[in-house]
Image: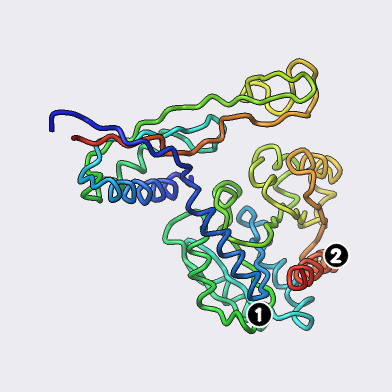
Amino acid sequence: MDGVKVIEIKKSVFAENEKDAAALREELKRKGVYLLNLMSSPGSGKTTTLIRLINLLKDKIRIAVMEADIDSDVDAVKIKEATGVESIQLHTGGMCHLDAEMTRQGLDNLQLADVDLVILENVGNLVCPAEFDTGAVRNAMILSVPEGDDKPLKYPLMFSVCDLVAVNKTDVLPYFDFDLDRCRENVRLRNPRAQVIPICAKTGEGMEALAGWLLAEVKAWKQE
Amino acid sequence: MHELGIVFYIIRDVKQAAEENRVEHVSAVVMNIGEVSTVVPEYLTDCWRWAADKEELLRGCELRVNTIPAVSYCDDCQQEYETVRYGRTCPRCGGGHTWLLRGNEVEIKEIIVSS
């Protein structure tokens, strides 16, 4: 115990997860399964949006859902009852996000041979899930009108990793100081490639456009 | 908020490095944490204390944080500027053709062990 030794590591903490995620994506590609990682704040309407979306798509493609929460299974039960598709609950054990390994464990509980699209509803949070690649083909998020059009400025990482931003609850636009154009511009600043689709999960407005985007994505992934 | 998850990742990587180097106890882990990495060093060290003391290999092991200042680069001016102060807008030309040069690191720099 007379001296100390320094062992250089110089390794990103996320490196292992990124490796796991890339491997999972390759495996999903081989199996022809499209995994969508859906993120948002709590209360943005993720579950309601999912129910409508699944009901629009379930006759065209085979869908399964993985609900990630810190605790409870209310979302998984609700989705199953409202859509009839297979829905499983993942618990993160107190963690604020899912990583690629946890996602893989969840997928192991599904019959992937019978599924074209798996939607992963990540933990409701705009910070942590953005840091961890789950192995999904695409990341999408729901931003609801009451949250404000400045969220892309406050949570830049989340918006820079998402390929699609669905702006939900457009029925309350008249009551909030939320400018759709300003929101689009704020998203564009963070990620010029991201698409913005305004929706209202409650009334169904814009849901066809969202379903169309997802259907085209799944088809392209299976054909490429 | 996600610091605990990051701590579990650090522990996994340090355990692996310790095994490869046949180390029985690690006295310190040195991290490089970028200013705009979204990791809060105080939360990280708090989570670390709680989780590291549960491991034989890491009992009492200190987590040291080197902060890496965030620097952006403006393609139009071809010069660097401080990211935290000016964000995405170049302070010289007011343009937005800028990108982060460094400051996003969450990496394990080295581990210190008794020899």
Q: What residue sits 77% from the left and 54% below the top? A: A167
Residue matched to label 2: A209
How far separated are the C-alphas under marks 1 and 2? 22 Å
Residue matched to label 1: A115
Same chain under badges 1 and 2? The reply is yes
Disc 1 residue type?
Answer: Val
Residue A159 in the image: state x and y as whole percent.
69, 46
Q: What element carries label 1?
A: loop
Q: What residue sits 72% from the left and 49% below the top? A: A146
Mark 2 nearby-residue class (10 Å; few <14, some 14–19, many ≥20)? few
Residue A168 in the image: state x and y as whole percent.
76, 57
Q: Is A100 on the left or on the right of A220, as rendered?
A: left
Q: Mark 1 lies on which chain?
A: A
Q: What element carries label 2?
A: helix
Based on the displayed image, in which of its 4 quarters is residue A3 positioned? top left
Q: Mark 2 lies on which chain?
A: A
Q: Check the picture and name the quadrant holding the C terminus of chain B.
A: top left
Q: Earlier in the sequence, mark 1 or mark 2?
A: 1
As drawn, the residue found furthest toward the top would be B92
Q: What residue sits 77% from the left and 66% below the top? A: A217
Q: In this view, does B96 lie above or below A47?
A: above
Q: For the image shown, how many numbered marks are present on the structure?
A: 2
Mark 1 nearby-residue class (10 Å; few <14, some 14–19, many ≥20)? some
Q: In this view, does A76 lie above or below B21?
A: below
Residue A131 in the image: state x and y as whole percent.
56, 48
Disc 2 residue type?
Answer: Ala
